[in-house]
Image: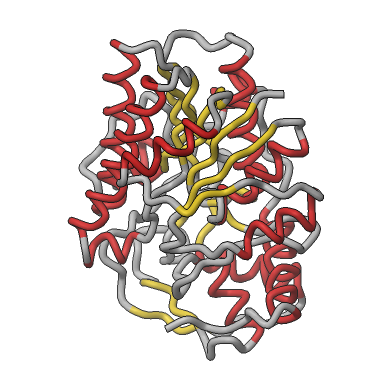
Amino acid sequence: MAKILVTGGAGYIGSHTIVELIENGYEVVSADNYINSIPLTYERIEVITGVKVPYYEVDLVDLDALKVIFREHPDIKGIIHFGALKSVPDSVANPSFCFDNNNISTNNIAICAEEFDVKNIIFSSSCSVYGNVMPEDLPVTEDTPLKNAESPYAYTKQNGEVMLRFISNVRDINAICLRYFNPVGAHVSGELGELPSKRVNNLVPVITQAAAGVRPHFTVFGDNWNTRDGSCIRDYIHVTDIADAHVKGIALQLAGKTKGNYDIINLGSGDGVSVFEAIQAFEKACGIKAPYEVGPRRDGDVETIYSNPKKAEMVLGWTPKYGIEDMMASAWKWQLKLAELGLAKEKL
């Protein structure tokens, strides 16, 4: 089977994608700079798969360091590019750092793909590229016009897509941008989940931390949005489903079955879940209360976003397998594993 480079492979979605790649017979090489991850993740991957993944501590902004990976693995056939700063609040607080990291790294990946004759790139994009969508435009499709980015993070994802579109127009590179909606949950084994090196701010891990007593409570950012219950609405997808879609995308490229050199595909469920509904789903699935308080709206947040997933089903043969309660149950299982590993601590 082909060898695939996964950037950001020690991260949340990257690590689950490595598991899915291995279980589908691929060889994997990983690169990560551990800004928001730790090398322990590779041990968790090995527990599940029995495979030691070769990995490099590399900042993708360092082009010379990145080229070392390709020189040492000349048989790489595809790149799945997750390596990016993903925190919306952090990007709002420090936009220049986010711009440098996310945009330069994507361009460097494209440079290496051309130089080392790697023809296939899967770019892990985001639903945040759509900005604040009007209710009449929901669910969004791949043809929904992009609004102004609500955060520097979202802007870098818009830029990444544009960069790859222009590059694929003039180079022998096949790029697929997967606009994934909110990934949550953990591997069903309970052996792998979100393991950031910094304080988490995504909804589901803060729910599980609060339920486990790791933090006293978490904050719901606003209950006065123009939604059915006043909280933001998102399209939650199990992280393993997101990983599966990336594997299906690289398989499509390697089989030469893509239409053209560039494509965009949404990864969503077609339905939106509010923050309060997600909390209720956790409490129902796990039988545990998750203490929270309501705070002010957070800069950079989008009110409502969910997807029409028809294209993913048609092009990739992909549909989500897990529902919201499955996501919450797996996330809780991972929270218990973190306690067992001595890692269930809130990072400041």
Is 137 left or right of 336, judged from the image as shown?
A: left
Query: Is residue 270 visible to the viewer in this orientation of the structure?
Result: yes
In the rendered image, which quarter contains the N terminus?
top right
Percent across and percent down for residue 35 are 41, 63
Residue placed at 23% from the left, 49% from the top?
100
For this rendering, which residue is in front, 124 or 291?
A: 124
Residue drawn at 42 percent across, 39 percent down: 125
**Left or right: where 96 falls relative to 280:** left
Relative to residue 229, is residue 129 depicted above or below? above
Residue situated furthest left in the rendering: 96
User: Measured along the vertical axis of the image, is residue 59 above or below residue 116?
Assistant: below
Residue 51's x, y, as percent? 76, 47
- Residue 150 visible: no
Identified at 76% across, 31% down, the residue is: 25
Is 288 situated above or below 189? Answer: below
Residue 292 locus on image (x, y percent): 51, 83
Specify whether 173 is left or right of 45: left
Q: How many marks?
A: 0
Image quarter where the C terminus lies is bottom left
Residue 285 placement, left or right of 161: right
Q: Indicate the quadrant where residue 287 lies.
A: bottom right
What residue is at 47 percent from the left and 54 percent from the top?
A: 57
Against 296, is 112 above or below? above
Depth order, front residue of 162/171: 171
Picture quadrant where residue 90 is located: bottom left
Q: Nearer the viewer, residue 267 or 13?
A: 13
Residue 99's x, y, as percent? 23, 49
**Color scheme of the displayed model:** secondary structure
